[in-house]
Amino acid sequence: MPGGGGIQTMSRLIGPSRTLRLTALGETLDPGRAYEAGLLDALHPEDQVQREATAFAQKFAQGAGHAIGSIKMALYEGQDMSLADVLVFERQLYRAIMMGGDIGEGVAAFREKRTPRFKGI
């Protein structure tokens, strides 16, 4: 049995029926089927995995850290909230983003037609 919330997470991604087949019956998925089922968000040839993973991480590192953190919070913490509660939660996150320095840097970079230089969290 998967631990650490694995069953709930997998069920949300691929549904309870597929989750049951994979976990209870020990069925497996090749990478292509795992991608099609929504368990993976990207596939790369083995010799390119490290390069692609590094590039992906660098995109996050260069992004607006406060906004990215807020997006992650809204995504993961908001899953079990009602719509009314999510709207309140997102409004709080949005206000915090608007008060931070990333918004000013983003606007300035846009106006100056340059890549933004966010400070991070």
Image (cartoon, rainbow, N blue to C red):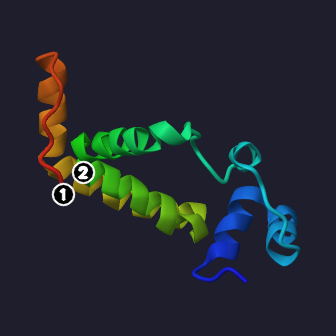
Residue shown at 77%/55% (left/top)? 29
Classify the position of the C terminus by image quarter. Answer: bottom left
Furthest residue toward front: 47
Q: Earlier in the sequence, mark 1 or mark 2?
A: 2
Q: Amino acid at mark 1?
A: Ile
Q: Nearer the viewer, residue 31 or 90?
A: 31
Whole-percent x, y for residue 90 in the image: 41, 57
Tell me the element at label 2: helix
Question: In x, y percent, where is residue 115?
Answer: 18, 26
Q: Say above or below: 69 vs 31.
A: below
Q: Residue at 84% across / 62% down in the picture?
A: 18
Which numbered circle lies on residue 63? Answer: none
Q: Nearer the viewer, residue 118 or 19?
A: 19
| Residue 105 image-quadrant placement | top left
Q: Quadrant of residue 28?
A: bottom right
Read off the residue under disc 1.
121
Give the answer, above or below, for where 71 lies relative to 81. above
Q: Is residue 11 left or right of residue 51?
A: right
The quadrant in which residue 59 appears is top left
Query: Which residue is labeled 2 in the image?
Result: 65
Quadrant where the N terminus sits is bottom right
Check contact, mark 1 vs mark 2: CB within 8 A.
yes
Residue 38 placed where, x, y %? 69, 49
Amino acid type of disc 2?
Answer: Gly
Tell me residue 86's x, y (percent).
50, 62
From mark 1 to mark 2, how far is it between C-alphas?
5 Å
Residue found at the very far top of the displayed protein: 113
